[in-house]
Image: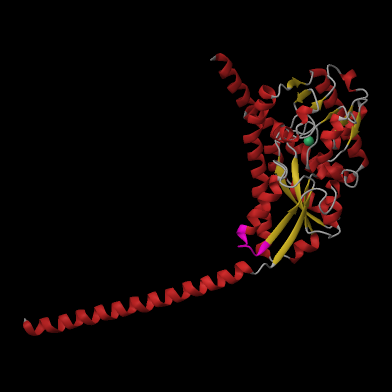
Amino acid sequence: MTQNKTPAIILLLLASTVLFFGLYVRQLASDQSTASAMISNSSESTAVTYQWRMVTSWPKNFPGLGSAPEYFAEQVNRMSNGRFVVTVHGAGELVPALGVFDAVSNGSVEMGHSGAYYWKGKIPASQFFTAIPYGLNAQEMNSWLYYGGGMELWREIYARHNLVPLAGGNTGVQMAGWFNKEINSVEDLKGLKMRIPGFGGEVLTRLGGTAVNIPGGELFTALQTGVIDATEWVGPYNDLTFGFHQAAKYYYYPGWHEPGPALEFTVNQQAWDSLPPDFQAIVEVAARAANQDMLDLYTAKNNEALEELVNVHGVELRRLPDDVLAAFQRTSQEVLQETIAADEDVKRVYESFSKFQQGAKAYHRISEQAYYDVRDQAAQDK
Ligand code: CA
């Protein structure tokens, strides 16, 4: 028995020693690899390999619209571990608010953040990539862009202008705007000077008004001094910040002309091509996150801003009369049909957009819309 026991103890000691030594070597190796990873991380994070400039159509850090470029830049910085830095420039810093398209297209800067419908003079079809009157809401717009063929058309059309477009946020349904004249009938639109871009502006012009496109930063003064009688901008969250309630009496809804406007990021084609695939992926994912983030922000902030406008500042909240909304809808169709006939791209984009809208309407009638109706009814019954 004793003779058998001794070798067993020796074997056990030997095995423990081998195990201990093995673990020690493993730990040593692991420590070394952690140390080298830390060294490589710290050298990567200090070496900025891409430094881009983004020009925007909004004042720097402007709540809502200006939140998307900042959010985008922050995410790109985080995801690249500081190796890709995008600096955001407010309207007028490097180029004027409405000079974003040209600056990115000609490569003066790498990126821009703006609204596609501002470029309708160059590209009539661009309006569909922001909003058209009585068109898609935010949820539907994102679905059309990402899953309904919208993004492919947008890329194809912007490629001719040396640009790569990315959806860059959505405000949700906007307000009809701030008015210093009461709108009680279609007659009241005659002679109305209003800031309203895109198709909406064309519709107002046909109904006897005068549509102008003034950058956001100049709107308050234009409204206060009577250069314009009315302006649409975004919705309560943004409008409160601008102080429009100090320059106009009436706040009308709903935003028939912009039911779910998308903003845009644009990237200069050569700048895009210069990025390695992982950084291109970072740009795409950061843009998609910024796109959703803006809608979430507006949804959260609009309600409380509206309460403040009405309860604290005494704003007169009004719904546009039915006959005015009906005239807007009729005239929108006329304008749309004429634009389609005049431009091949508009025709193609409209076909895709309107086909998608038919499907979205049919389903949303029995889902979103039916739910809103039921929820309101249930609240009334209480
Ligand atoms: Ca607007």
Q: Position of residue 182 (x, y in %)?
A: 83, 19
| Residue 211 x/y as whole percent | 90, 32
Left/right placement of residue 371 relative to residue 135 reads left
Q: Residue 2, relative to residue 149: is it above or below?
A: below
Figure colour scheme? secondary structure
In the image, residue 314 lies in the stretch drawn in magenta = no
Q: Quadrant of ligand 1?
A: top right
Residue at coordinates 92% horizontally, 28% vertically from top-left? 206
In percent of the image, x 69 and y 60: which residue is there? 85
- Badge count: 0
In which quadrant of the rendered image does the N terminus lie? bottom left
Which one is in front, 293 or 304?
304
Q: Is residue 43 left or right of residue 333?
A: left
Please provide percent x and percent y for residue 76.
Answer: 65, 57
Vertical arrangement, residue 382 with respect to residue 272, above or below: above
Q: Position of residue 114 (x, y in %)?
A: 78, 46
Residue 62 appearing in the image: yes
Q: Is residue 144 visible?
A: no
Whether 276 is drawn above or below 144: the answer is: below
> Is residue 145 or residue 248 the one in the foreground?
248
Q: Is residue 280 left or right of residue 37?
A: right
Identify the magenta region. Answer: 78-84
- Pick out the residue farthest to the top: 381
Q: Residue furthest left?
A: 1
Quarter of the view holding residue 103: bottom right
Rendered residue at 60%/67% (across/down) = 45
Toward the viewer: 218 or 291? 218
Query: Which residue is found at the position 33% from the left and 78% from the top?
Result: 22
Which of the two residues, 53 or 372, is positioned nearer the viewer here? 53
